[in-house]
Amino acid sequence: MVERGPSRAIWFWGALLLAFAIGVGISIALFRPAPHEPVAVAPSSRSVDHPANAPLAAGSSPLVAIPLHIELDLAKVDLGERLFHDVRLSGDDTISCAKCHDLRRGGTDRLPFSVGINGALGDINAPTVFNSGFNFTQFWDGRAPTLEAQIDGPVNNPIEMGSSWEQVTAKLSADDGYVSDFAELYPEGITRDSIVDAIATFERSLSTPNSRFDQFLRGDTTALSEEEKMGYGLFLGLGCVECHQGIGIGGNMFQRMGAKNEYFDERGTGTDADLGRFNVTGDEFDRHRFKVPSLRNVAQTAPYFHDGSAPTLDEAVGVMARYQLARELKEEERRRLVAFLRTLTGEYQGKSLGASAQARSPFRGRE
Amino acid sequence: MSRFGLSQHHILAGCAALLLVPLAVFLFFMSAPLDFDEHQRFLGSLRQIQASEAVLNQYLLRLRSGAVTSVDPINAEFARIDALERVLGSPPQFVAESGRRAIAERVAEYSELMDRKVLVAERFKAENANLRTAVSYFPVISQELVDEAIRQQEGRALATDLQSLVRDVLLFNVKADEVLAPIILHRLSRLESGTGPDSGVLVPVSLENLIAQVRTIVRVKPEVESLLNELLFIPTGEQTAEIGALYDRYYDYALESRNFYRLLLYLVAIVALAFAAWLIIRQLGHQIQRATLRIGVQNEQLQTQIAEIRALNEVAVAVSSVLDVNRVMEIILERTQQVMQADACSLLQLDEESGKLRFHVGAASSSRMLEGLTLDVGQGIAGQAASTGQTVLVNDAYEDERFDPEFDRITGTRTCSVIAVPLMSKREVVGVLEVLNKRGGEPFSDGDRQLLESMAAQASVAIENSRLYERSREGAERLRVALEQERHLSIEKDKLKAYIPKNVVDEISRNREQSLALGGRIVRATILFIDMEGFTRLSENLDPQEIVEFLNEFMTEMTAIVDARNGIVDKYLGDGIMAVFVDAGDEEYSLNAVRAAIEMQARLTELRSRWRKERPKFAELAIRVGINTGRVVAGNIGSPTRMDYTVVGDNVNVASRIEGACKPGEIYISLSTYEDVRHSIEAREIEPLAVKNRERPVQVYVVSTESDAA
């Protein structure tokens, strides 16, 4: 007992000391002054001071030039580009995104309606993929708020790519190249979200800056010819710019097809697709309303309208004036407007979309 | 006691830890500081959403007024608001669950309002674009018509009407009220009627077109106004304010509850510290108490050890000083009882004659009446110890079969605990030391046993020493008695002197004295042998009575001479005599012997002349005399029943040998005798004599009988 006493006592004192130390530690931890320094808000979308200092000049000009550079993750752009051209996103490995959004054809297939898997015919004209990142919503009826959401549509559409994400991820996961590339960029690997993110990033890279008109907007008054300038004047004066406006020269609002005259009455044989945004909202107000399409590169994206009914620009301009303005354009007016519209053709990867797109595409062999 | 205290401490500390530690941990987590990053993020998002709303509303108004011509900024604000809604939808973690639910509900309501606002904004954007298209196109087409009308003579009125219409429509477009609407419609109907097919005025297709534009303006403008109104009055701002207020409430609540828990944590910490302090003080107290106890115990042990050492010391002193056996035993008993703290102590001594153990009991012992009683070896516990030679320790005597309760009956006490240790002397059991009943009823320990064994070892030595001393003292006493008797005899001897010749008395005394000497002693003496030459041959033919008478006469004559010279007739050897002259310190013993020899020869010459008349047969007899001096062994030699006091030794043999070699009528002496008497006696050297047991021949001298007349 006499011998055991001292060792027991050491344990006891040790425990007490430890308890005391813990107590002191807790106290110190708690007496730490609370951080009153304001922490910077996560810069998710913009700086805090935007509302106070932002000049409301934004939007004061109806048409805006496309920035010459867009900051994007180039690795994701590359990966997205490969996916965009990969037929394995379709159910029967026949159709890639690029099938209907051919970068050599102005980002479209230049068909009234696209052909899906097994030769199925779509019910609406494929819009261009160029500058789609500037659209405020996606699809003619705006049912997808983002590019990412848009991709679900064609992939799952039985008459378009006729596949499912399960199928697509399984197929892509069998490709070692994809597996390692995805692993580098996305910790989660190959999933619907990572595929969609890569493709959407690639699509945002498909902006076409430096059109002649953009050069004109930037101050180069010689960029447009006199006739084109007159066409621009008509575009402003006749009110086209009220709908075709913003950075995309369109793509930022919905408008009724046939604002002043009934387009569908005179065209006849309405389809579900003709109902437009009504299909999304179910509101009578939205019947026959469509997203106003961007007019950028419009010379490269014939045929026109959601139904692909106008094979030429001249015709399309006439139809627009007739139904949206209730005016029969004179031939001179049409010519000038079309001349103006042709100045909206921009550049992709430094080359004009209208020039020699066919020779440029590195993906020709895979399609 | 102290062990209990310690474990009690542990239990207390353990309970406190079990109670306080989880409580402290709970409170610690409950009082964790708020996540200010999250707080700032939420508040910042709320501010941004409010700012975006304001900006959005400004854009909407400006879009209506035409100051803004692109709807891109509006779309962008809606997108921002949508993103911020998602942030608001997940309030910070520190907001209570109910608060999170409430805020999420409000945000959902806000989201619905915003969806509505987006929808209305879409219509507003579309209708506003419609209106603006019409308003911008209307003057163009109007001017075309006016230009055309002016070219015609009848068209002037029409042109005026058209110009008024343009003014009214443009005014209508910018005015808030719609009082101009009926006027415009009236003008329109007038225009329609005024330009009918019968009016004669050319009516181009574009007039219908113009009317369509005006109708659109009249129809859409109020719609746009109402849409704008609706947009501005959708209570999204109130909703965000409410969300802010709600969040503030829950933020304050979270802050307060954390402060409350922190306060509790401090309280718990203080309690824990106080408890720890109390435990420390308590523990210190216990330790002091334990230390005091330990010191007390050690002190007691030291006292005991001192007492034991003192007792052993006293016993040892007793062993070396007090030599009375009884006194030594008394001290041993007294000290043993004291040191062992026993009720009774007894020492049992083995009686060698009876073979029994005899009780000796200490004066302070409670079993005094046992003194002198005996018990057999093997009887009872003490007897067991004696018979086995091993210590016996019994702490419950009545449970032990070896115990003999007989003695309890005698003493009237009850034996509980016993230690019996055998007393050993030269590996023999000589007794037993026994203690009974430790005071206080405690059992005897192993330590007690060892102590008693060491006491017993001392006691054994003490008793043994005392016995030896006693024995030697008894011997001395006997010696003293003998000396006393000797003194008495001396007195008697003086009394006897008148009747008994002195040397006879002396001889008795001497013999008596010598008889006391144990064994022999070495003395220096001169040995004298005489022998009658031819007596044996002569005696064969003589009457025994005659021989005895002759010998008695002869011996008497010779003995008288020896006595006169202080010699002792050692023995009569048939016809010879052996006489001893012992060195008594006067150094005359050798001379006495030689003179006695000379006298003998002279006396025999006288006797022969007488015998020639009375006993003619003995008249020719002559004697041989041999003398030697040296160290001899003197003592009583023989069997106990027949014992002679005599001297033996080589020098006796030499004397006898010298006598044997002597010519009748002459006296031979050895060199050693001659050395003693050469100044008084004349002698001449003859040839040495070989003697048995001597390497060298003995130098012999012949005494000249005429030389000394003394």
Image (cartoon, coloured by chain):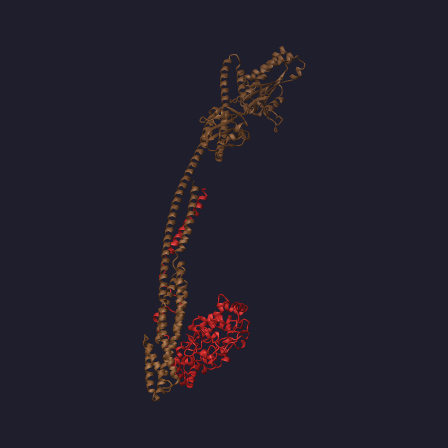
Chain colours: A red, B brown
Residue A227 seen in the current view = yes
Which residue is more in the foreground, B138 or A3?
Answer: B138
Q: Residue at x 50, y 66 (%)?
A: A189
Toward the front, the furthest residue is B198
| Side of B460 relative to B128 (left or right) | right
Which residue is more in the foreground, A177 or B351?
Answer: A177
Residue A74 seen in the current view = no
Quarter of image, res B256: bottom left
Position of the C terminus of chain B, as image quadrant, is: top right
Query: Image height check: is B234 above or below B1?
Result: below
List x then y, in percent, for residue A338: 43, 83
Toward the right, the furthest residue is B541
List x then y, in percent, for residue A96: 52, 74
Which residue is more in the foreground, B396 or B103?
Answer: B103
Query: Image height check: is B361 above or below A100?
Result: above
Quarter of image, res B526: top right
List x then y, in percent, for residue B49: 37, 67
Q: What is the count of numbered marks?
A: 0
| Side of B159 relative to B578 (left or right) | left
List x then y, in percent, for residue B674: 56, 24
Position of the N terminus of chain B, as image quadrant, is: top left
